[in-house]
Image (tube, grey):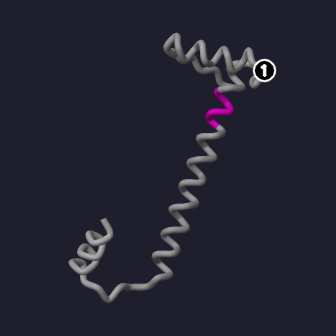
Amino acid sequence: MIRHTISIPERMSEYLLHQVNSGQYGNISEYFRDLIRQDQQKTQSDIDKLRGLLEKAEASGVSQLSLDDIKNNARKLE
């Protein structure tokens, strides 16, 4: 296990201690580990969504429209 030291404003510290004292987390380290896990899951979800969009775009083939046509169509959607 690696130890890290961080500094946070008093207001955040109060919130953090409230989370721990409410029994939601056993200690401060558990709280931060949970935040990191949530961030990792969100990042992976974002990557998966992007991958899906790229696969969909690749599967749609090559457009016969010119770049100007594509831009004009996009502007109409705004």
- Tell whether 77 sits left or right of 45: left
Count the labels in the image.
Answer: 1
- Asked if residue 76 is positioned above or below residue 9 in the image, the reply reads below
Q: Is residue 35 magenta?
A: yes
* Residue 68 position in % (x across, y down): 21, 78
Residue lying farthest to the bottom in this orientation: 64
> Which quarter of the figure is the N terminus placed in?
top right
Residue receiving disc 1: 23
* Residue 7 position in % (x across, y down): 51, 15
Q: Residue sitting at 32 percent across and 70 percent down?
A: 77
Q: Residue sitting at 50 percent across and 68 percent down?
A: 53
Q: What SS does tag 1 mark?
A: loop
User: What amino acid type should be assigned to the residue bearing mark 1?
Assistant: Gly
- Tell whether 64 sits left or right of 44: left
Report the front residue among 71 and 27: 71
Q: Residue sitting at 69 percent across and 22 percent down?
A: 29
Q: Give the main secondary structure, helix, strand or loop, of the magenta stretch.
A: helix
Residue lying farthest to the top in this orientation: 10
User: Quadrant of the rendered structure where residue 65 is?
Assistant: bottom left
Q: Is residue 18 magenta?
A: no
- At label 1, counting other C-alpha atoms closer than 10 Å, the crowd grade (few under 14, some 14-19, many 20 or more) is few
Q: Residue sitting at 68 percent across and 33 percent down?
A: 34
User: Quadrant of the rendered structure where residue 64 is?
Assistant: bottom left
> Which quarter of the figure is the C terminus placed in?
bottom left
Report the front residue among 8 and 75: 75
Report the front residue among 78 and 67: 78
Q: Which residues are magenta?
A: 32-36
- Asked if residue 14 is positioned above or below residue 46 in the image, the reply reads above
* Residue 56 position in % (x across, y down): 51, 75
